[in-house]
């Protein structure tokens, strides 16, 4: 949503971040009009992107910053919930192990999902760490390939892609 709002206009994203307060004077000042319009455009974009079950949670909000903060609170939670989620994602990362009946593409989709969840929570995880974990967690079918990669000493040049 942040990306979408930013592409509409930097002013619209700024309205989400900084908030908008109704001025005590009429909206005759062009900069006040711009802030007012940006707030409503951002509200419209968020409302249009919501499903009905989510929309009812933010309908009472007067300004877009209120909406955004409420949505963040609902989806990210407070610090304790964030930390619990991070622990869960870390455990998933540590427990990654490819099954013998699993295709490599399916396994990599699962790995990417866990990595993106960790990065989405704001934690940095380097590709090098992820690649080493993937190589350790592959089935024995890939042992020759893993050994070749490790022996070639090219680990610093690999990316997750």
Image (spheres, helix red, strand yellow):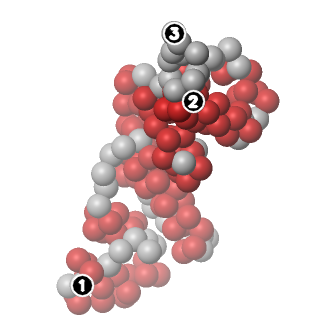
Q: Which residue is mark 2?
A: 33
Secondary structure of residue under mark 2: helix
Query: Vertically, is 9 above or below 161?
Result: above
The residue at 73%/27% (across/down) is 55
Query: Vertically, is 141 above or below 11?
Result: below
- State left or right for residue 48 relative to residue 122: right
Residue 31 visible? The answer is yes
Q: Earlier in the sequence, mark 1 or mark 2?
A: 2
The residue at 40%/50% (across/down) is 119
Secondary structure of residue under mark 3: loop
Q: Which residue is mark 1?
A: 154
Residue 154, picture quadrant: bottom left
The residue at 46%/37% (across/down) is 14
* Cα–Cα span, label 3 and label 1: 63 Å
The residue at 57%/30% (across/down) is 33
* Cα–Cα span, label 1 and label 2: 56 Å
Secondary structure of residue under mark 1: loop
Residue 4 visible? The answer is no
- State left or right for residue 158 relative to residue 102: left
* Cα–Cα span, label 2 and label 3: 13 Å
Residue 24: mark: 3
């Amino acid at each position: 949503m942040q990306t979408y709002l930013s592409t509409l206009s930097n002013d619209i994203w700024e309205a989400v971040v900084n908030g908008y307060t109704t001025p005590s004077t009429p909206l005759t000042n062009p900069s006040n009009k711009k802030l007012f319009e940006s707030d409503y455009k951002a509200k419209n974009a968020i409302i249009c992107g919501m499903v009905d079950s989510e929309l009812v949670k933010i309908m009472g909000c007067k300004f877009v910053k209120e909406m955004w903060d409420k949505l963040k609170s609902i989806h990210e939670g407070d610090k304790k919930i964030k930390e619990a989620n991070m622990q869960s994602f870390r455990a998933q990362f540590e427990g990654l192990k490819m099954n013998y009946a699993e295709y490599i593409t399916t396994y990599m989709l699962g790995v990417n999902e866990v990595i993106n969840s960790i990065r989405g929570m704001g934690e940095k995880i380097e590709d090098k760490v992820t690649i080493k974990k993937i190589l350790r967690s592959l089935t024995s079918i890939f042992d020759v390939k893993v050994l070749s990669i490790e022996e070639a000493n090219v680990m610093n040049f690999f990316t997750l892609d």
